[in-house]
């Protein structure tokens, strides 16, 4: 079985495959952000550090592009993004509001 697949590839719908590609790509982009940040923190060469940080910011851009694709192509992602992104205040309180709870 191919890496990252938990069932045979041939049993997956086209939508599931596209979602898998997007989610896998998002994970890789976020991992790259982390790697570049760690390398920049450890780097004692100012110019190289700036290059690493530049590369990190580009990986963030790629991750956001992938998140936007997920939003446009999956109703569940779209709903959750609408509920939680770009909100103000305590995130858990936002969840209680969305779920109609009193903070239990």
Image (cartoon, helix red, strand yellow):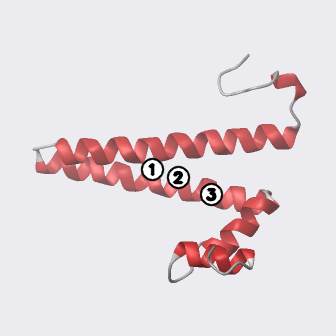
Tell me which residue sits at (69%, 57%) in the image.
Answer: 69
Residue behind mark 1: 59
**Left or right side of 64 for 23:** right
Marks 1 & 2, CB-CB < 8 Å contact: yes
Give me the disc on residue 67: 3
Residue behind mark 2: 62
Give me the disc on residue 43: none
Marks 3 & 2, CB-CB < 8 Å contact: no
Point out the image quarter for the N terminus: top right
Q: Is residue 98 above or below residue 15?
A: below
Circle 1 crowding by C-alpha within 10 Å: few under 14, some 14–19, many from 20: many
Q: Is residue 87 above or below residue 69?
A: below
Point out the image quarter for the C terminus: bottom right
State the image coordinates of residue 96 (x, y, percent, origin top left). Answer: 65, 76
Q: What is the spatial separation of the Cα atoms under label 3 and label 1, in whole angstroms?
A: 12 Å
Q: What is the spatial separation of the Cα atoms under label 1 and label 2, in whole angstroms?
A: 5 Å
Q: What is the spatial separation of the Cα atoms under label 3 and label 2, in whole angstroms?
A: 9 Å
Front position in the image: 63 or 83: 83
From this viewpoint, which residue is outermost toward the front?
104
N-term-proximal mark, 3 vs 2 = 2
Mark 1 residue element: helix
Front position in the image: 79 or 97: 97
Q: Is residue 91 above or below residue 69?
A: below
Mark 2 residue element: helix
């Amino acid at each position: 079985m191919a890496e990252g697949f938990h069932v045979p590839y041939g049993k997956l719908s086209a939508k599931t495959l596209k979602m898998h590609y997007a989610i896998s790509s998002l994970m890789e982009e976020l991992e790259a952000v982390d790697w570049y940040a760690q390398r920049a923190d450890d780097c004692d060469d100012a110019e190289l550090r700036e290059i690493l940080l530049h590369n990190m910011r580009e990986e963030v851009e790629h991750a956001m592009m992938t998140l936007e694709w997920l939003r446009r192509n999956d109703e569940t992602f779209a709903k959750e993004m609408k509920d939680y992104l770009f909100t103000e205040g305590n995130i858990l309180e936002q969840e209680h509001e969305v779920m109609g709870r009193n903070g239990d």
